[in-house]
Image (spheres, grey):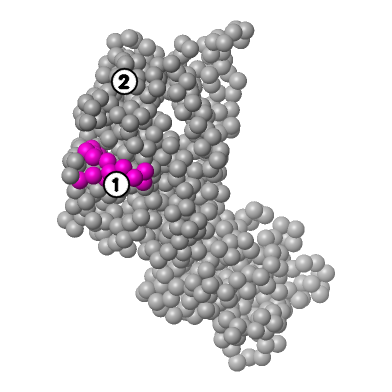
Amino acid sequence: MTPDIGAPGQNAMETETDIRSTASRQIEAPDSQVARFGPDDPLRLDCGVDFAPLTVAYQTYGTLNEDRSNVILVAHALTGDQHVANEHPVTGKPGWWDLMVGPGKPIDTNRYFVICTNVLGGCLGTSGPASIDPATGEPYGLNFPVVTIPDMVRAQAKLLDHLGIETLFCAIGGSMGGMQVLQWAASYPERVFSAIPIATAARHTSQNIAFHEVGRQAVMADPDWRGGRYLLEGANPTKGLAVARMAAHITYLSDEALHRKFGRNLQDRKEITFGFDADFQIESYLRYQGMTFVDRFDANAYLYVTRAMDYFDLAADFDGQLANAFLGTSTRFCIVSFTSDWLFPTAGNRQVVHALNAAGARVSFVEIDTDRGHDAFLLDEPELFAAVRGFLDSAAQARGLPALVPVR
Amino acid sequence: MNAAPPMTPDDPIRTMALSDRRDLQLLADLIEPGSRVLDVGCSDGTLLKILESRHGIDGRGIELSQRGVNECVAKGLAVVQGDADHDLINYPDNAFDYVVLSQTIQATYNPRFVLEQMFRIGARGIVSFPNFGHWRMRWQLLTGGRMPVTEHLPVSWYATPNIHFCTIRDFVALVEELGATIERAIALNSKGNRIDEGASLRRRNLMGEQAIFLLSKPR
């Protein structure tokens, strides 16, 4: 496949090489703060492995207050990373939640201290399959243990312990980030004052596991995957990973949004070509999405992180009763879903709400009307911002955080 | 009373009484400080806000309309999207000190079931509703022969979300059937003033435009 890219200036060979080297540098020497935990301080994983050494890369925004009560943990989604609100070191693009996090934004960094970690199994500095295994001096590849959402949360908790942060004022995240938020609330209820799981579910559905399997098979079918040893052999399964991304990207949008944005419009041509070039704008768009993704994401990391989502089933650890995960909780919850999200539809979010009600938890639930599908949580959705801002304000009042004095 | 906002069939606001804060104040007065309260059909959260400003009340809400829910959440209230007919079953027994149905009961599909759920979830229930036994209703039906349309109930029969109207007498009969106890039965006249609670049921049913009942669960 020769991706027919939509953006100018992206295919200059030199730039691409630069991006690749920047991307690979992020694995061992990220443009982020890092916490390292040595062999004497392992992380017990769900699969039974005591993992060490562990590196956790993270970004922070704002200022930690004196009693360390203003911490908001932002948890990123499958292909997100810790660069929430700063220019991305590889792509040069604004942070993925720039609209939500920053001075004066709903998650106001003038008021809150925001932490985002790269998840365990990721590829932007936290230990993952692309990291070097000190036992062999080579990248872990498939020798990296299979991690879970609870493992990701344990790694985050370990970082907070290391930073001397006892409680989170709020844990917030969308999609896989929302799974982490739910896990935080279930695993460490006393450490989470408030929680905002967005466009998520308490378990990954069969359909969603199916989509992930398609993505993984695309990666593994690429001859350059080399049984997961591509980094050692100087290859990169970019074609497989790009296809995985293309397929996944469709699930993040909606039929309506695709129709509105692209319709059946042709790409830089007046007529169809009776060939397999990207005749349609949507094809060109997807190819572009696939191609840019491989510059910043490690193929094995994609396998591991999708697997973690597949394994997520919060109720399973609580006798199959989701409400039991939240019994006696004093955490304040705000659940948000989007009408056109068919990947994490309202019904799945509502199951969480019902479980929280049954557990007697304090919960707010907003469904936001939008045609932008699952991706809506990353976009300019004023009702989302209003809900997050209002919820955080009221939680801050309950937590006794001082109100912001407007600066003249 | 202020000019009423335009009403459409999908408009969730059930009666104009909601914009008259007096009945909400009265209703709030029935709730003891420090209580846990579930407001079923909490609209834009006005009552929950009033309750929140009173010391120690832990208020939750359910609201059918997305607009209402979003407004409530933006105000920092613990409100979820849902409806009385389907979502009360998700709450555990005796989870609240009070369950409030403020101008909600007449918009439910199954008022009896909703009341049963109310008593299951809460130790006490507070129910307010427009009284269809009010003399003006009777007069309109008697003289015009058509379903009454009033300032408080401005929507025609085919468009109103209020599908189960009742009179004060009807309501009392249902409460008795359910075996619950009526602790207070307040009727408000068309000016929003309280009719003497010592007045006969007959008089309150005739003169009361709005009714507010404080009930305790069947033993």
Q: Which of these two is toward me, A21 or B176?
A: A21
Determine if marks 1 and 2 fall on one subunit: yes
Q: Is residue A48 magenta?
A: yes
Q: Which of these two is toward me, A209 or A108?
A: A209
The answer to whether residue A30 of the structure is visible from this angle is no
- Percent across and percent down for residue B192 are 57, 77
With B34 as the anchor, is B131 left or right in this view?
A: right
On screen, residue A16 above or below A193: above
Q: Is residue B71 magenta?
A: no
On screen, residue A200 above or below A98: below
Q: Amino acid at mark 2?
A: Leu
* Residues in magenta, as a range: A41-56
Q: Amino acid at mark 1?
A: Arg
- Percent across and percent down for residue B112 are 68, 72
Label 2 crowd (10 A; few <14 / some 14-19 / many >=20): many
Tell which subunit mark 1 falls on: A
- CA separation in Å, label 1 and label 2: 27 Å
For the residue labelled by badge 1, is the local secondary structure a helix, a strand or a loop?
strand
* Location of mark 2 (residue): A231
Tell which subunit mark 2 falls on: A
Label 1 crowd (10 A; few <14 / some 14-19 / many >=20): some
The residue drawn where x is 56% and y is 38% is: A207
The residue drawn where x is 54% and y is 56% is: B81
Select label 1 or label 2 by which is in front: 1
Q: Residue A44 bears which disc, if any?
A: 1
